[in-house]
Amino acid sequence: MYSTIFRLVALALLVNMAIIWPAWALTPKQQYHQAEKTYATLKKNIRYQKYRDKWLACIEKYQKVYRLDPSGPWAAAGLYKSGIIFLELYTHSYLVADRQEAVDAFRRVIQRYPKSRYTPKSRTQLADLGGPAVRSRKSATTRHLKKAHAEYNRLIESAARQQYRDQWEKCVDHFQVAYRSDTSGPDAAESLYMIGLLFKGLSDKSHREADLDQAMEYFRRVKYEFPGSAFADRTDAELAGNNPGTVATVDEDDPLAGIIAQNQNDSLAGTPDAAMLPTGLVTVQGLRFWSNPSYTRIVIDADQETRFSHRLLKKDPSIKKPQRLYIDLSKSRLGRNIQKFVPINDELLSDARAGQYTGESVRIVVDIKSFKTYKIFSLKNPFRIVLDVWGDDSDRQTASPSTSPLTPSTGTLPPGAIARQLALGVSRIVIDPGHGGKDYGAPGYLKGVHEKNVVLQIAKRLARKVETELKCDAVLTRTTDRYLTLEERTAIANTQNADLFISIHTNAVRDKRAYGIETFFLNLATDDDAIRVAARENATSAKNISDLETILNDLMQNAKISESSRLAAMVQQEVVLHLKNSFSHIRSKGVKQAPFYVLLGAQMPALLVETSFISNPRECKRLTSAKYQEALCDGIIRGIRKYIKETSPTAFIYPSTERDKKG
């Protein structure tokens, strides 16, 4: 009897260890190889293949590869393999939902990673995908395309029809229906190309520049969205043949006009040589973005500071143009290797495009599907422009991130499940270890000690405690020694729909005697010391901090200032009280406010903890010890727990079964 009980207890421990093993302990590469091993085991074990939870557990491992680093080199591989396994699961389950999950995974690879080697594989999978629903979609697309071509032939054969704009638009509508029925299928490029031809033909009749511009826009979409298709080659001739010797005039109501002219020249001679442009211009180096269904952040990178302006344009149904927002950078030029077309394809935005608008200005155009509000601001060192776009449902704190996978059924509650079932205000916490990679952070008093390594150790300990003690999901912005921009860290928190955002740092000053702990939240700086800390963490000057304050009033509308202040006070108090139980010379420097780049645009209560002074001999030694790091994390956990209890009084009142488990 006792041996049986022992075996059951041992089994329960193993199961629990599997459940709470933190995802942040592995890099994306390691996670992928772990997923491959799980998949190989599943393929060898016919008995396992009879159980749905075995398949879902394997899929979950591949999807974690994507979630660990959505913009990294392993993300597309993880998504693609999750689609492949969903297809295999479908052959056992015959559930249409499983087949649709595979389709969705392949589509996301195509949309988010157009240059990945997994994109053509995903296209092939979508083209060859079996099953009635997919065959029905392919059949419908073929039927729509056939009907559209029939309408096109009637139009071309009738000079009388060609005299009426509605006949051209009717034909365009048919091809748009064909395109929308399968936006990544084998017929999508042809549909877009034919729409371009129709607008070009219409422009010959209407003599409207907007119609020709619309044609060029569709040709460019074919070129950038379907680079390997036969129709992509045809678009080069269309773009090059559109009056290559002329220079387009600037039309303030058409944000594409200058860009179109530049793209026409580019197709003939490539990107303009630096010698052909005026000297002393700022170089626009790239576009980056992060998104979920209710939030998107776009960052425009440049090598120097420059003035910029922006304008939001309304839809123009008469020429079927979407709502657009453009940003003009003065005294600027495009970088030689910049990606000019960036497909976004989320719920809010279609894409972003860059072009040399005039000889001394660059224009970025963003096509909008829908939005609630947006904000634009700039950061320095290096200079970049940040565009945040929020959707109608961006205020929902309980929404799951767009990348959330299906959770396998384990029969027990995984971390975070209790919080979600009780509908608490806190179920996911994003923890940000400051600095990393080429950014070492502050040097320690002891040789070889650097802030980036210390805060990563603390953050990992804190993540483990968040999952095991608070029963919340913990997401780390970085799990290895890699460089992240400050705006990327906030974007991760927003796109993960975090309920709290905590950035971990160590303090440093020239005076080695300075010591203590302080916690910050986003607001205008209140004293010179706060300005100094913010300037150091922002890697900028105190003057730039003063400049930054001028844009904070707008940003505060989306910042959780009062909640952040309350959370900061509780964390600061609990950390200091807990450390004083085990260590001497613990000093509280209090709660302060300052404009930190890493907190700008955060949609949840957010704070930055300066855990101790790495420049102080005593505190530097403590920061490298496991005992001190554990005590720091325990204090932060106590502060978070206190905050949760105040905001959600029932947070830690578990059901009787949960109390029994906890003993």
Image (cartoon, grey):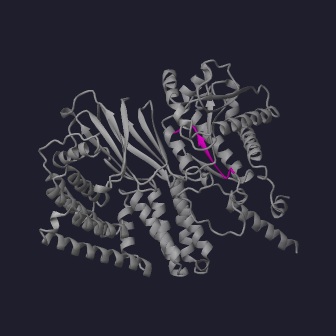
The residue sitting at 25% across, 68% down in the picture is: 171
**Which image quadrant for residue 255?**
top left
- What is the number of callouts on the image? 0
Asked whether 203 or 399 is in front, the reply is 203
Name the spot of residue 571 as percent of width and height, x first. Answer: 72, 37
Q: In this view, does 520 lie to the left or right of 282?
A: right
Residue 273 visible, this angle: yes
Image quarter of the N terminus? bottom right
Q: Give the range drawn in magenta.
A: 425-436
Name the spot of residue 606 as percent of width and height, x first. Answer: 62, 40
**Which image quadrant for residue 536?**
top right
Asked whether 542 or 477 is in front, the reply is 542
**Which image quadrant for residue 369?**
bottom left
Image quarter of the C terminus? bottom right
Name the spot of residue 178 as percent of width and height, x first. Answer: 32, 70
Asked whether 616 or 574 is in front, the reply is 574
The residue sitting at 72% across, 63% down in the picture is: 413
Name the spot of residue 607 as percent of width and height, x first. Answer: 63, 37
Residue 131 visible, this angle: no
Q: In this view, does 542 lie to the left or right of 133?
A: right
The residue sitting at 44% across, 56% down in the picture is: 346
Q: In this view, does 460 lie to the left or right of 180?
A: right
Q: Is residue 557 above or below residue 2?
A: above
Is 299 covered by the magenta stretch?
no
Q: Is residue 641 left or right of residue 338?
A: right
Q: Is residue 50 above or below residue 231?
A: below
